[in-house]
Amino acid sequence: MYLFEKDEDSIVKQALLLSINLHSNGNTSFYSNIMELSKSYNLPNFVPNNLDETKISRYKDIMKQKYVTQWRYSVNYTRKLEFYNTFKHCYQISSYLNLTRKTINRKALVKLRVSNHKLIIETGRYNETPHDKRLCPVCDSNEIEHEIHFLCYCPEYFKLRNEFFAQIQSHLHNFQQLTYSDLVIKLMNSEDIYLILRLTNYISLLNNLRDSILSSKNDVT
């Protein structure tokens, strides 16, 4: 709408007209990309040179709804996002992103949330290790090394975990009654900056300790 209202001799208007001409002759251009996008989203009665604020708002809503639907499908049916799916149920900005903008350990939390980490539950996918064989290399529990095991169960992190729990229990209602799965969900969705900062630090410490333990084991072998 903005470009169509520009003066005919302006550079942007001339560029638009050239793009339209390329599209009319069957060539790919900025204008043809817009038209393809309107088709992919099935936008009703989409005419680029006949847009107003009401139509633009309507088209934005349609595109957002379809994007969110695709997002939900990906979260629900992508195995890599299995952990993410346990706590992320709404398409909205997660609170921790604003709470941890200047936190040096923020990356550790981000990578754990989306399973972009070194845990065997993730790295085992690369060499096609069966899901039930992706066991924790740090401890002797014969348990799968997934995110919950890493955060709440692995005995090798017992001391760090107890210190972390001692720091956060007064900030979580009914802490003692929470299952580990429920605890992780509450932490990942928390809007309490104290909890988020303690969590990011805890994950970073766990990563460092895990690397140290595995390095020591490799030196022995």
Image: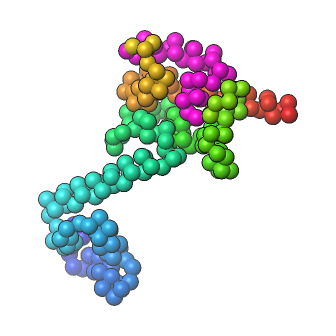
Residue 34, given in percent of the width and then of the height, sits at 31, 70
Total marks in image: 0
Camera sees residue 90? yes
Position of the C terminus by quadrant: top right
Residue 62, given in percent of the width and then of the height, sits at 24, 58
Specify the quadrant of the image occupied by residue 195: top left
Decide which of 6, 183 is in the foreground and name it. Answer: 183
204 relative to 15, above or below: above
Is residue 104 toward the left or the right of residue 11 in the image?
Answer: right
Residue drawn at (47%, 16%), measured in percent from left and top? 168
36 relative to 117, above or below: below
Decide which of 194, 174 is in the foreground and name it. Answer: 174
Q: Residue furthest right?
A: 221
Decide which of 56, 38 is in the foreground and name it. Answer: 38
Is residue 153 toward the left or the right of residue 54 in the image?
Answer: right
By secondary structure, the bulk of the magenta-drawn segment is best described as helix
Is residue 84 toward the left or the right of residue 131 in the image?
Answer: left
How was the colour assigned to the protein in this rendering? rainbow
The magenta stretch is: 146-173
Residue 149, given in percent of the width and then of the height, sits at 58, 28
Residue drawn at (59%, 29%), measured in percent from left and top? 150
Residue 146, given in percent of the width and then of the height, sits at 58, 35
Answer whether residue 170 is magenta in the image. Answer: yes
Position of the N terminus by quadrant: bottom left
Residue drawn at (62%, 39%), measured in percent from left and top? 132
